Image (cartoon, helix red, strand yellow):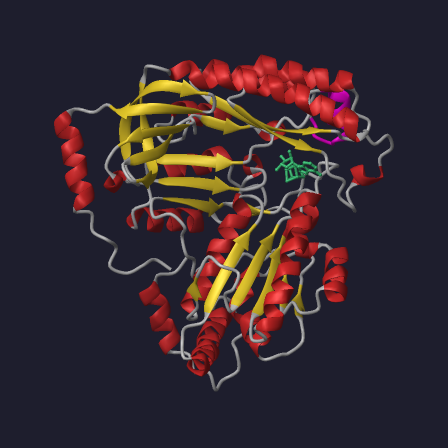
Amino acid sequence: MIRNEELEAVLETIDLRNDAPIEEPMRQYYFIKKAREIVNAESEKLGRRLTADEETFGCQMNAKDSEKLIGILENIGFEMMDDESADLVFYNTCTVRDNANQRVYGRLGLIHSMKKKNPHKKVALCGCMMQEPTVIEKIQKSYPFVDLVFGTHNIYKFAELIVSMYNSDKMIIDIWEDTDKIVEDLPAERKYSFKSGVNIMYGCNNYCSYCIVPYVRGRERSRNPKDIIREIEKLVSEGVVEVMLLGQNVNSYGKNLEEPMTFAQLLKEVEKIEGLERIRFMTSHPKDLSDDLIQVMKDSKKICRHLHLPLQAGSTRILEAMNRRYTKEQYLELAAKIRREIPDISLTTDIIVGFPGETAADVDETIDVVRKVQYDNAFTFIYSRRTGTPAATMPNPVSEEEIKANFDRLLEVVHETAKSRVGRLLGETHSVLVEESSGTQLSGRLSNNTLVHFEGDAVLVGTIVDVKLTEAHGFYYIGKINMQEHRLEELLQKCRHRELPEEKML
Ligand code: 5AD
Ligand code: SF4
């Protein structure tokens, strides 16, 4: 991340008559300047600013990537809007399950008719789905009106790709199979002023047999801890109070660094950052969750009381076929240990139903784990066959009827346990980070990630307040601000006089 003024100073020194530099990020600064010229010229032709619309599918990693892409677009002169009639529409795609792919194809159908009416409209596709060769073939054949296609490894090149796109009337395709490159110091636009995702690593080396992520996000690469800390310090100086450290498997952070470092050690460093109030992270693979991490969480004042610990399946036989590298018993032991050490923690999970060969008895094992672990929430997915993964060629696909019956059975227990877990704090007062407002209705999250709705002044968005949880409603609470009059008044005054950052962080 680079500040606006720093970037402008560098851009001043760039002479576009020279060739583009080879080194990054200088090369991208050069193309940012070049793209600005193009966008300006187009805007002059149209007599208005060029507009852009982004649609992001999938996980927090993609959301974070989109912030970087939007940062570049705004910097080169586009005005963002939330409407596909924009001059440039980009889809940041997901391919973890097939329904995400189908949604993108559906949207492209609509865009085609819009593009016929507006020939200068540009369409760009990026993200995980684009890393699949069969997808690229299909786009070339069935959606030839698309202007730009790029993948997950080269999003930092967006300015350069935009320049190529405006200089060509053919589809530009730039997909890299893998990369060991991490480019720092590029512009990024943040969706929220008070919380932010922070990538700590990219890719995944686990090769769970159903999962396409290692093929589309590449092998695991950790960011240098100094860059991570520097980014968080900058975010905090801009008013961020909560960070979510992002990685496909944060528990294996640091293994490939020149000076190896564990995730637990990184957390200790992040904890030291003054002004930062809350630390979250996503996602933890149970096989790599260390005792050190549990200890660091236990001792921490800032790490939130929430752990997302994907189970995927409760049957050891299925777990083995999934290549998860833990048994049902090991998972249960781990969950029990975490609960023993950090009793107020909330555990959430991901579960897949319908993996090849999964029987009703296997799903009984999953239900047994849900009952024993008592998750606060579980995201349940129907298995989706992903071409190229080992599971795609496994025998014994499960019939749709069986999947539906098993899925419904599982969901019932998930709801039951979640309801009793989530309600356990009823009547207590806890701190809530206020995230949204609608009139005087505020919504925020507890440290354990449960949603709370309560009455209050909209200026409190972005601050942490004490709320008494007065009603439990399944997955959320209704509450009431419960702070001493003078403390609340002090906070309100501070919020009302909160200086808006003079210049926006890019
Ligand atoms: N089918 C269904 N769900 C999947 N997930 C990953 N791959 C698949 C698949 N092929 C789920 C896993 C993972 C979550 C992000 O998506 O549960 O934890
Ligand atoms: Fe996919 Fe497994 Fe990696 Fe998660 S840990 S991204 S499920 S391969």
What quarter of the picture does the C terminus occupy?
bottom left
Vertical relation: 489 (above or below) 15: above
Out of 150 and 284, give the one closest to the viewer. 150
Residue span colored magenta: 315-325
Q: Is residue 483 left or right of residue 181?
A: left
Q: Quadrant of residue 434?
A: top left
Q: Is residue 111 left or right of residue 321?
A: left
Q: Is residue 322 magenta?
A: yes
- Residue 421 % position (x, y): 48, 16
Query: Residue at horizontal 54%, vertical 16%?
Result: 417
Query: Residue at horizontal 43%, vertical 29%?
Result: 449
* Total number of numbered discs in the rendering: 0
What quarter of the picture does the N terminus occupy?
bottom left
Out of 472 and 227, give the one closest to the viewer. 472
Residue lying farthest left?
A: 486
Query: Residue at horizontal 61%, vertical 62%?
Result: 111
